[in-house]
Image (cartoon, rainbow, N blue to C red):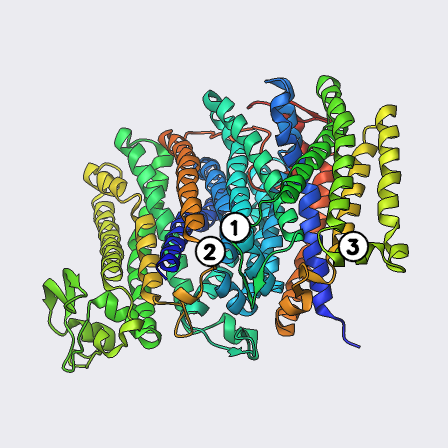
Amino acid sequence: MTIDLTIVWALIIAFAVFAYVVMDGFDLGIGILFHSFPVGHERDTAMNSIAPVWDGNETWLVLGGGGLLAAFPLAYAVVLPALYVPLIAMLLALVFRGVAFEFRWRDPAHRQAWDIAFQGGSFVAAFMQGVALGALLQGITVVGRAYAGGWWDWLSPFSVLTGLSVVAGYGLLGACWLILKTEDGLQACAHRYARWLGPVTLGAIGVVSVATLFLETAYFDRWLTWPNILWVAPVPLLVALSSVLFWRSLRRGDEGLPFLLTLFVFFLCFTGLGISMWPYIVPESITIWDAATTRSGQIFMLVGAAITVPLILGYTAWAYWVFRGKVKADGYHS
Amino acid sequence: MFETFDALLLARIQFAFTISFHFLFPAITIGLASYLAVLEGLWLKTGKPVYIDLFRYWVKIFAIVFAMGVVSGIVMSYQFGTNWSVFSDKAGPIIGPLMAYEVLTAFFLEAGFLGVMLFGMSRVGKGLHFTATLMVALGTFLSAFWILSVNSWMHTPTGFAINEVGQYVPAGSWLDIIFNPSFPYRLAHTMTAAYLTTAFIVGAVGAWHLLRDHETVAARKMFSMALWMAAIVAPVQIVLGDLHGLNTLEHQPAKVMAMEGHYRSYPDGAPLILFGIPNSVEGRVDYSIEIPNASSLILKHDANAPLAGLETIPEDERPPVGLVFWSFRVMVGLGFLMAALGAFSLWCRWRGTLYTSRLLHRFALVMGPSGLIAVLAGWFTTEVGRQPWTIHGLLRTAESASPLQAPAVAASLVAFIIVYFTVFGAGVVYILKLMAKPPHRGESDMPHIPVRTAGITPASALEPEAQGAGG
């Protein structure tokens, strides 16, 4: 029996995208909340809590994009033109946000402007990622081997909804990260945000999930026909359970658990997305096997990935371990 | 029809703009990474403080340039799909895996060693730190290796077959694809160009500080090192460029015809046109200044060898002559100026006036951006010279583009121009500010701002009291 390398690569790409979403999610979230923190100590602390890790986080985005081209060139060629406007907006927003990290400190005279760039860039990037997801789910027009729609097809009430949902979700991740990593005033501030962003995010998950079911009959069938329903039911049930636990731990004043539970809910949402789409990579028109590159290419790349990905993961884990503990305005103290 | 043409032209301008901007940063970091490794190696060997001062001076500049290279590079990894989707579909099975290797390499480099290199000097020990610096230099080389392999394959595609849906797929060994015929030449020429680019920037910064005070020890040292590079490597680069040109003549003769301005064929030896104004309508170079038979001598090593002209190429397969002709001359002209500066510096060195000749310092200062300009001119020559193809002889540029409407591309192009000039303009200002200060004895480490743009920096947490000075 030979292993189906197409499935292996689909899992690798899915992993890279998920790694990106959870890791850049919380630091984009802090950017989204940035201006609600008082200027000075609180703001500097919020920025410092993500400073050492954000760009490693963002590199997963390159791996997601580059990996899609490498492993599923047809999907890359169809999806990217369809999502032209949200993707370009996201990239430009990330440019602004990325340099703001550095320039904010180098140029105190214009710090206010770079702070605005940081928050604006974070918000736009998060919103456009959600919009892109919604646009993909609602279906894109494919004729032959190319995108055949217009340049505003991505814009719909559903995609705006998914965009705002991602903003709320990232905001929640960011707030929970700050609960974990900071103390005193900033932590209390983050706690307040988590208490209202938690319900908002849960509500958004519910609305998006239900709306998704009615986008395509195939989505509906994958979730709500017998016996599929037995296999997929744990996903929404676990979301409900996690939400209850989240609320209780937040009220109890736990510092780490809210963040972990939010991550788990993100994982469940991602799993749900996989259930809706499988085995399509462009919903209802291109499967992963249609889009896959050659077996020779899959093997060639697997050698490189098998060496580097574990090293990257190990290093990343180590970096987070080194930076454990609370952060202060002037950097990490143990 | 008119609509699609417009979108295509805009997409080409956008790609040219974003990749030209992007390449300026790696052109510096490739060379600077190696320069930093040399400085640290010399410091470890000799123990002279001037080397570590220079290392700390340049590593601050390296950090900003690297950061800008990263963010402009993220854009590139998506542009193939957003704007060149048909190309991505057809060539993806070949170029995708090579680019995946580039990402994995760059990723590993960035996550693993950059942070240690930037912040770890006092925390991981000299040996490990030097290893990190070497790894960063190696990583920039590997990045360039994979990307140039992809680019070279688009110029000289080998090792491929065409499958039933029209994709180019690997025919057998990946080695045939990676080491395609133009790759070794392009790699050598481009890497050398990056080293020269850095040398001339370092030389100009040294010259600037020598013009103000020619006693500055570190300025003397960097100036001297940079001009050794100029004196030795600039002539080597001329030879490498010539070899690359001969390789191009073999595989892409139309590009060389455009570079030379040879519209018609010369059965008894072709002239070398030094200057002139290419006139594609009439198919001749107006007001040309020529050296008879010199082109045949250079390209065929025989003054009377026949050389074919663009008239032998079907009209719809000819590259645009004007841009190729001029950018080639800018590149070559700057190359000879670089060699001239190198030779002049040897003369001053021999006379003992290397650190006092204001003429030499002014010359070196003016030549500061010469590497960057030459690198761009070189890329313009080779990329425009490949037109009308994206994959030479296989896939036309007009057939490679995404099915996008012109307003979409026009809007994104304007956005890119505004954002790049704002953001990278600010970055360049910060770099120039750093360069304007002379390196001094006991140069400080990276500013202890608790912030990184590139690289995870766990090392800095190990000594928390070192934090906090900045911000």
Q: Quadrant of residue B304?
A: bottom left
Percent x, y of residue A66: 58, 57
Left or right: residue B331 versus residue B402 is left
Question: Label 2, label 1: how many angstroms apart (C-alpha)?
Answer: 9 Å
Is any part of residue A52 visible from this angle? yes
For mark 2, name the chain: B
Residue beneath disc 1: A84
Residue pictured at 52% horizontal, 75% vertical: B166
- Viewer-side residue, A150 vs A247: A150
Report the disc number at residue A220.
3
- Tell me the kind of residue under disc 1: Tyr
Percent x, y of residue A281: 67, 60
Left or right: residue B329 versus residue B150 is left
**Please, is residue A14 above or below residue B394 in the view?**
above
Q: Are marks 2 and 1 in contact (CB under 8 Å)?
A: yes
Q: How many residues crowd around disc 1 within 10 Å: few (fewer than 14), some, or many (20 or more)?
A: many
Residue beneath disc 2: B404
Same-subunit check for callouts 2 and 1: no
Left or right: residue B445 versus residue B282 is right
- Tell me the kind of residue under disc 2: Leu
